[in-house]
Amino acid sequence: MQSNTSHISIVLCRPQFAGNVGAAARCGKNMGIGRLVVVGKPNLDQDEMYRRATHVAAEVIDGIRYVDNLEAALADFQYIVGTTARLGGARGPVVSPREMAEKVSGISQENRVALLFGPEDAGLTNDELRFCHLVVNIPTAEFKSLNLSHAVMILCYEIFSCRLSTEGRFVSKLASSQELEGMYGQVAELLVRIGFLNSQNPEYWMMHIRRLLSRTGLHSKEVKIIRGICRQMDWFLESRGKEDKKT
Amino acid sequence: MQSNTSHISIVLCRPQFAGNVGAAARCGKNMGIGRLVVVGKPNLDQDEMYRRATHVAAEVIDGIRYVDNLEAALADFQYIVGTTARLGGARGPVVSPREMAEKVSGISQENRVALLFGPEDAGLTNDELRFCHLVVNIPTAEFKSLNLSHAVMILCYEIFSCRLSTEGRFVSKLASSQELEGMYGQVAELLVRIGFLNSQNPEYWMMHIRRLLSRTGLHSKEVKIIRGICRQMDWFLESRGKEDKKT
């Protein structure tokens, strides 16, 4: 199901670096999430913030809601997703970004959702995590400390991709078996003609050729390209024969 | 199956900003990918690069391999993943980061894989994309322009998160970029000779042919078969010319 991204906000709790706030705005904008809340009245360099946001996400920076404390910032949200790099009993169960995205796709239809991130140095405290309905941990190798804006990107990307996987944007149409067989017949004929295949037993090498072309999943257009090459080759051989006869 | 990240490199082609190179090094380190190649001798501010990498990824910056041109940078890789923000006929079929990760998890077991990213302003050119076995498009909302290091993060994250269910799937050795380039050169020559490609502008159709052959992951033996067909075709055209002269 498609998340309702107009119901989703990025909430940055006590961010320290203006560059990260700007970069987070850009990430949100890339993934269709245009609401940003900044908690704790940090002293942020406006130029750096706008620079990293780029002009396209400048409107996200213009629209930042600044709130003094976290409780007030979260008051109107119905579902709060927290993030943590640390794992352990005190933090309770965590989910992956992908599991979070699946949950949020349904919940965001009718509810306002906050994606909550802690400050760069220490992350969210246990106290702050208590507000959260769900806590996400981004899987990493040994080096766990993600840049804040990169953590924002991964969550926004998962939310945006989750809606896409059900829309099937990347499923493109492959050539039909009929198209493929027509092509292979034409290829085999040509290869016999030029003596690459033995007309008595063309199958061994054709099997290799089929295998290498088919496992890729050919599109109709690509089948037409291959058939076009074969046709051109035939035409070339033909017309050359005629020319040679003329001389 | 989890990717063998020690076989995977991040290749940044002509990056303009030291901060992005540093941030990309940190992203790689977060996700277990510690090799970084920088192409094109850019003039990068070392301090900014180390600052954004943080001390944990400093060793990635120390180990950067700087290479003058892309062809040399890619010569030893057996599978090259390119990235593009633009879609359209001239770029051929693209896959999602997730589909890419599934592919790479198997291929990286036995092969050196490059994740190739273009410069911040314009991305990879069509010429540069020709080296790629697979082209990835990161899905976005209307605002398509991702910061370079965020694009790096999404690909590295997907690779790290992917655990392919087809445990123990047969993974064999693929042809190197050098073998492939030799083959494509020979194919292009033949297609120009028979008039399928215009010698003035062979690149459009060659791009489609490259894409359809490369995304499958060609083995050395298959490269030899294709070159054998080209050679046979040349020989056939040659000997036919001679025969015709005799008569």
Image (tube, coloured by chain):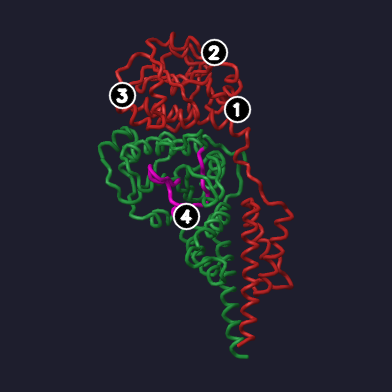
Chain colours: A red, B green
For disc 2, the marked residue is A78
Using the image as rendered, state which of residue B101 and residue A189 is in the foreground: A189
Q: Which residues are magenta?
A: B115-138
Task: Point out the tag, 1 or 3, that comes first from the N-terminus.
Answer: 1
Taking A172 as reference, is B198 left or right? left
Q: Chain of mark 2?
A: A
Q: Say which mark, if any, is on residue A166.
A: none
Q: Chain of mark 3?
A: A
Look at discs 1 and 3 and give the one toward the viewer: 3
For disc 4, the marked residue is B131
For disc 3, the marked residue is A46
- Alpha carbons under labels 3 and 2: distance apart: 30 Å
Q: Answer above or below: position of B191 versus A140.
A: below
Q: Secondary structure at mark 3?
A: helix
- Alpha carbons under labels 1 and 2: distance apart: 18 Å
Q: Magenta stretch containing residue B128, yes or no?
A: yes
- Alpha carbons under labels 3 and 4: distance apart: 41 Å
- Alpha carbons under labels 4 and 2: distance apart: 48 Å
Q: Chain of mark 1?
A: A
Using the image as rendered, state which of residue A174 and residue A90 is in the foreground: A174
- Alpha carbons under labels 1 and 4: distance apart: 35 Å
For disc 1, the marked residue is A2
